[in-house]
Image (cartoon, rainbow, N blue to C red):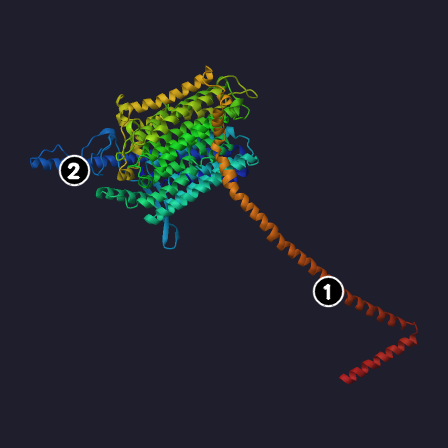
Amino acid sequence: MNWFLENAFLIPLIPAISFVVILLFGRSVIGVERVQKVGITAVGIVWILSMIAAVSWITRVEDSTSSKYDDAAHALIEVSEGLSAAGADAEPLDGALSGANGTLHLAAGDDGHADDGHGYATTEPVISKVDGWWSSGLESFAIGTLVDGQTVLLLIVVTSISLLVHIYSSEYVKGDRRFVHYYAFLSLFTASMLFFVMAQNLVQMIVGWELVGVCSFVLIGHWWEERPNTDAAVKAFLTNRVGDIGLLVGVAILFGTFGTFSIHEINTKIGDASQEAAAAGMANPYHFALLMASIALMAAVCSKSGQFPLHTWLPDAMAGPTPVSALIHAATMVVAGVFMIGRLYPVFFEGFSIGTSSINLMAFIGGFTALVGAGLAFAQWDIKKVLAYSTVSQLGYMVMALGVGAWTAAMFHLFTHAFFKACLFLGAGSVSHAAHHTFDMREMGGLRKHMPHTYKTFVISTLALAGVFPFAGFWSKDEILLGAYAGQEGAGSFLFLGKYPLMLIFGCVVALLTAAYMTRVIWYTFWGEYRGHGHPHESPKVMTVPLWILAVMAVVAGAFNLPTPVLELFGLEGLAHLVQTYAEPTHYLNAIGLSHPDPSLWLALVGLALALAGIAITFMYFWRNTGPHGLTERNRYAKAGYTFLEQKYYLDHLYTDIVVGSIKAPIARAANWVNDNVIDKVVNTAGEGARDSGRWVYRWIDQGTIDNTVNALGSGADAGGQGLRVMQTGKVQNYGSLLFGTAAVVAIVFVIVL
C-alpha cells in the first residue's frame, strides 16, 4: 500500500496533463461539446487515487501503532519480570498501556508527554524526493512529496469538491463563450492545489501557493468583458501579492535559521529544541526567529485566507462563475493559509507561545475576523456575498482554533466546512440558474415551492454552518469553542471563560450571528412570494445530484471526529477521533507538547443554544413581524451602524481612496510633471532641431549646392549643344573638313604618345 504514498506525485500530475490536453486540443480535436469529459475523467481518477492514498495512510498508521504497541508490551513484560524477580511491586509502572481505538496510549511514556485521553500513533510521514531539482551557489534543492494524515485529509477535500464542481459546471457553464478555457483552468487549479498540499519543501509550497493565485485571477476574471469582473480579478491578485511579501520573508527567515527548506526537517528541529529546552527549564533557543517568521507568514495567511485586514478581495471575487466560487473561494484555495499554519504548526506554536499564553496575534486575528465577517454578512443583498463573508468568518474560526492550540479542531472544521459551504454556493448558483440569473435576494422569494431539492439541500447545509446538532458543523465548531475554553496545559485560566477568554467570547458571538444571518438568507430566498422575473424552476439533475451529495456530507462529515463519550453509548468507541488519530501529525505536535482537552457537554449545549437562539430570533423577526422593524430609519445611531456595515467598515475606501490614492495621486502628478517638463521638452527640442537642420540642408545643400550644380551642368550642356548646332549646315564638304581635321588631330596624338 505504501506504493501509492511513495508515488503520490501522480495525483497532481494527472489534472496538470488534463489542463494541457484541454487547452491545446479542446477545440480542434476533442470538441467544445465534449471537453468537460476530459476534466471530469481526470479528476475522477485523481479522486480514486486520493481515496487509495487515504486507505494506505490509515493502514500505515495502524501498522505503526501495532508495532509500537507490541514493542511497549514486550518492554512492560520485561520490566515486570525484572521487578518480580527482585521482589518488587510491578504495579506503579510509568508506561501504562490501553487498547482504546486500537492505538497506543502513553502516560509519561516513550515520548515524554502525558496521555490526554485520546488515541494516537506517532507515524512518520512518507517523503519521496529527487535531489538536485535546481541549485544556487553551493545550495542544491530537492523536489518531492510529503504525505501524512494532513495531506491525505486535504486530498480528499480538494478532489471531492473539484469532482462535483466539474460535474455541476457541465450544465451551469454550458454554452459559455470560453467553455474550453474554463475547464482547462479548473484542471490547472486542481493540480496546483494538490501540488501545494503535497509540497515536500517551502520552495515547492511557494510555487503551489502562487499557481493557485494565478488560477484564481484567471477564473475570477473569466467574463473579463465586464469591468467589475476585471477589477475584482486585479484586486484579488494585488491584495494577495501584498501578503506574499510576508510569505517570502518568512520562508527566508526559516531558511536562514535552519539552513534547509525541508518542511519535515524544520518541524523536527523545532520539536527537538523544544523538548531539550523543556527538560532544561529554558525557552526555545529559536523563539525570536520563529516569532519573526510567524509574524511574516501571518501576512500571507491574511491575504490568501481572507483574514482581517486583507479580506476585502474575497467578497469581490464572487464576480467569477458560481462553481468557481464554490471550488476556489469557499472550499479549497482560501484554506491554503490555514493549511500552511497546520503544516508549519511548530513554527507558530513556539513563535506565538501558544502553549503558555492567553492571547496571541494569530488567535486575535482569527477571532476578530470571524466577528467582522459575520457582521458584514447582515448588510448584503447579494446571496453570494453573504456566503463570501460567511467564508471569511469561518476561516477566522479556523485560524482562531489554531491560535488557541486546537490543531485538530481547525483541520476538522476545514474538512466539514468545505462540504456544506460548497453546497451553499452551488445552491446559490442553482437559484440564480432558475431565477433569471440574479443573485439579489430582493428579486427572489417563495422558491421553496418551485425548487424543492435546492431548498432542502440549502437548509441542511445552513443548519450545518450554524452548528445545529447533529449536523457536521456542530461537532467541529464545538471543538473550536472547547479549544478556546480549555487551551493548553501551560496556560492560565480566566474565571469561567477559560484559558482564552476573548477568543471564547468571539466564538460564542459568531455562533449566534452565523445562525441569524443564514436564517435571513433562507427567508428572503425561499419564503414569502416570488418577487423576481420569469418563471422559476428546479435545476436539472446534473446540478441537483451534486447538491444532495454535498448535503449528505454536511450531515455525516461530523462522524469523522466524534468524541469517545458519544460513541461509547453505541459501543463504537473504536471509531472516535478519527481525524485526530489519522490526520494529526503527532511526530511534530507531540514534540512541542500539544495537548487535547476532554469533551465538555455544557459547552456543547451553550454552542447549540446560541445557534438555535439565532435561528429563532431571526425567524420570529420576519415571520411574526416582531422586533425593532425600521429601526435604522427612526434611530440615527442604528442608521450609522448599518451604514458602517453597508460600507464594509470603510476598508475599501481606506485602501482605494486613502492608501492607494495618497500614493497614486502624488506619483501621477510627478509623472505628469516629468512628462510635461522632461519627456515633452526633450521630444520638442529634438523635433525643433530636426526641423531647423532640415531647413538648413534644404537651403544650402539641396538648393544651394546640388540644385545649382545640376543647373550649371544643364546650362553647359545646353550651350555646347547650341555650339554644335551651328555646325549642322547640311553641306558635305563641311562634314568632310571636320572629319579630316579630327583624323589629323588623332594621328598627331598617336604620334606624340607613341
Residue at numbered disc 2? 75
User: Residue at coordinates 33% horizontally, 44% vertically from top-left?
Assistant: 290
The percent position of residue 375, horizontal first and vertical second, equals 44, 28
**Tag of residue 701:** 1
Quick one: quadrant of the C terminus? bottom right
Residue 700 image-quadrant placement: bottom right
**Tag of residue 507:** none
Q: Is residue 110 above or below residue 732?
A: above
Query: As drawn, is 630 to the left or to the right of 673?
Result: left
Residue 572 image-quadrant placement: top left
Q: Tell me if I can see residue 636 in this picture.
A: yes
Q: Tell me if I can see residue 219 in this picture.
A: no
The percent position of residue 231, horizontal first and vertical second, equals 53, 37
Query: As drawn, is 744 to the left or to the right of 406?
Result: right
The amino acid type of the residue labelled 2 equals: Ala
Given residues 143 and 377, the one toward you in this image is: 377
Q: How many marks?
A: 2
Quick one: quadrant of the N terminus? top left
* Precedes in sequence: disc 1 or disc 2: 2
The percent position of residue 627, horizontal first and vertical second, equals 45, 18
